[in-house]
Amino acid sequence: MTDNIRTHLYSCAMLPAEVRRRALAAREAARGLVKQSHQLSDAADLLLREAEAALYALRDTMRQAPTRIAIGYSGSHIRLLAYHVLPMHLEVGDRFPDETGEWEVASRPYSTAGGEKVNAGVRRVAHPAIVEERTWVARERVRVHRAQRDSLSA
């Protein structure tokens, strides 16, 4: 019934021209708003899918084996490498920064009862007397700097 009334409203010659003109303008405005809402919805869906794809790629990258990135070369036989390792793979001497400064792993890591957390003793590089116990989530990788001997210069 609504469609019949609209059809009559837009084509009735007895209706004042101003009423017809405003009805047509309202119809076009409504169509424009519906079209714009569909476009915004499509854009939001696209952004959501892009975010999900980026999150999937990040999770996939984090599951991969530890990566080695050369970050510098000092002297003739020490090379510092950056690794992303699981906390259980930390080694004594590995270094990592946080908001308070640079820390060095001082004891072998050990896991707690459920295997959910990993603990290790660490000390400040600038102040070796400052020693703490650190806890990490067992499945989250830690970025560390590891000094390794260069076999070519020995």
Image: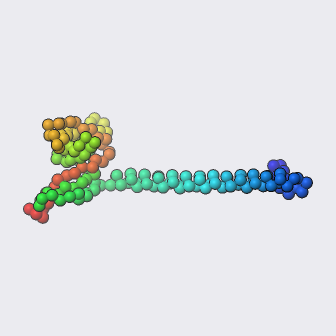
Q: Quadrant where the C terminus lies? A: bottom left
Identity of the residue furthest to the right in this view: 14
State left or right for residue 128 relative to residue 15.
Answer: left
Vertical comparison of 41 with 129: above or below: below
Give the image location of residue 52, x and y in percent: 47, 52
Number of numbered discs overlaid on the protein picture: 0
Identity of the residue furthest to the bottom in this view: 152
Give the image location of residue 79, x and y in percent: 17, 57
Identity of the residue furthest to the left in this view: 154
Task: Out of 9 and 4, give the one closest to the viewer.
Answer: 9
State left or right for residue 9 relative to residue 147.
Answer: right
Q: Tell me the residue at 18%/41% (across/down).
A: 124
Q: Tell me the residue at 16%/47% (across/down).
A: 93
Give the image location of residue 111, x and y in percent: 25, 39
Q: Tell me the residue at 35%/55% (across/down).
A: 61
Vertical comparison of 101 with 16: above or below: above
Q: Please identify the quarter of the rendering in which residue 12 is found.
A: bottom right
Task: Out of 33 and 20, give the one closest to the viewer.
Answer: 20
Q: How is the image coloured?
A: rainbow
Give the image location of residue 95, x and y in percent: 21, 47
State left or right for residue 1 relative to residue 106.
Answer: right
Q: Is residue 7 visible?
A: no
Q: Is residue 112 visible?
A: yes
Q: Tell me the residue at 19%/48% (across/down).
A: 94
Q: Please identify the quarter of the rendering in which residue 53 is found.
A: bottom left
Q: Please identify the quarter of the rendering in which residue 122 is found.
A: top left
